Image (spheres, grey):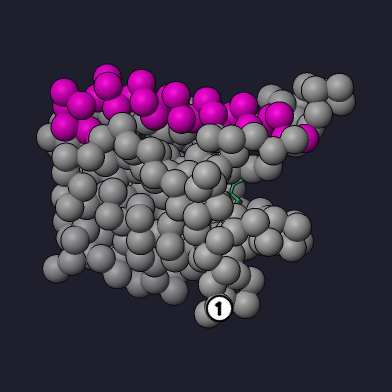
Amino acid sequence: SGALAGRVALITGAASGMGAASAERFIADGAKVLLTDVNVTPGRELAASLGANARFFELNVADGEAWTSAVAYAEKVFGPVTVLMNNAGIHGGGFIEEYDEADWSRSLAVNLHGPLLGMKAVVPVMRSAGGGSIVNISSLQGREADVGLISYVAAKFGLRGLGKSAAVELGRYGIRVNTVFPGLIITGLTRGQSEHYMGRIPFRRPESPTRSGAASDVAALAAFLASDRASNITGAEITIDGGKSVR
Ligand code: NAD
């Protein structure tokens, strides 16, 4: 039972933060989940703690061959992947005047090329299964730009465009593609950079010591987009930022 009963979901970057919260949420909603990450030990531990409907597989999203193996592994243990959450991400920084090619390449490889490789790997499986749902995690930085983050901003804006293109291309197969733009959430990625940012968020949640959004907020949205409740939603762009970007 549950809104995701019968679904097999592959989540990238599932060892931490929003990916981990989404794995928990998807399982609570009835899905079988392949947690993937480059960070193996916490990923395995989390999957073990989530029971028989969770498995872990090591996957660097920038590695196309690893994608093929991960999708095949999911099919072997659970069945064809019908939900893909492209969540893995890394911060890329930089000012144009301090452009660092390695940082730029790394950010584009993980934050933008990774999701493309993921879509390429799951589309044949989803087509055969009669459809699927892809949820891409961009960032508020993929809608508006803070200074000094060129590698991250460019990749996350790129992911927005990739999501739109994919929605248009894949709709005919019953594959929905939606993009989520989270505001600040305290995770491994952002710990320590919060105070400066927090004053600018209208919802200063009293229940949260950090007053930021919670990873579980993003997980709930991803679970909705993955489910048939969102069956007529594709190409959508949903900001989840406690009102920070409201003008
Ligand atoms: P996090 O650092 O807690 O988790 C990200 C996970 O991705 C980590 O477990 C890491 O090991 C994994 N990862 C990194 N490189 C990888 C690779 N090449 N292949 C596979 N896995 C890899 O971060 P988070 O805050 O949960 O971020 C999740 C997503 O949300 C990211 O795409 C991030 O850019 C985005 N985001 C985060 C925030 C925020 O405030 N935390 C805001 C907007 C968007």
Quarter holding the N terminus is bottom left
Residue under the point 59% across and 35% down = 144
- Quadrant of residue 199 within the rendered picture: bottom right
The reply to whether the magenta stretch includes residue 220 is no
The span shown in magenta is 148-177
**Mark 1 burial class by Cα count in 10 Å: few <14, some 14-19, many 20+:** few
Residue under the point 44% across and 70% down = 48
Q: Cβ of disc 1 within 8 Å of ligand 1?
A: no
- Tell me, yes or no, if residue 108 can be seen here: no
Closer-to-camera residue (8/97): 97
The reply to whether the magenta stretch includes residue 154 is yes
- Quadrant of residue 202 within the rendered picture: bottom right
User: In the image, residue 226 lies at what x, y percent?
Assistant: 27, 49
Taking the image as shown, residue 225 lies to the left or right of residue 238, namely left
Disc tally is: 1
User: In the image, residue 66 lies at what x, y percent?
Assistant: 48, 35
Closer-to-camera residue (124/57): 124
Closer-to-camera residue (195/221): 195
Taking the image as shown, residue 172 lies to the left or right of residue 93, namely left
Label 1 sits on what residue type? Pro
The residue where tag 1 is placed is 206
> Compared with residue 218, is residue 166 higher up or lower down, i.e. above or below?
above
User: In the image, residue 191 lies at what x, y percent?
Assistant: 71, 61
Majority secondary structure of the magenta segment?
helix
Residue under the point 45% across and 52% down = 240
User: In the image, residue 81 lies at what x, y percent?
Assistant: 27, 43
Residue under the point 69% across and 25% down = 105
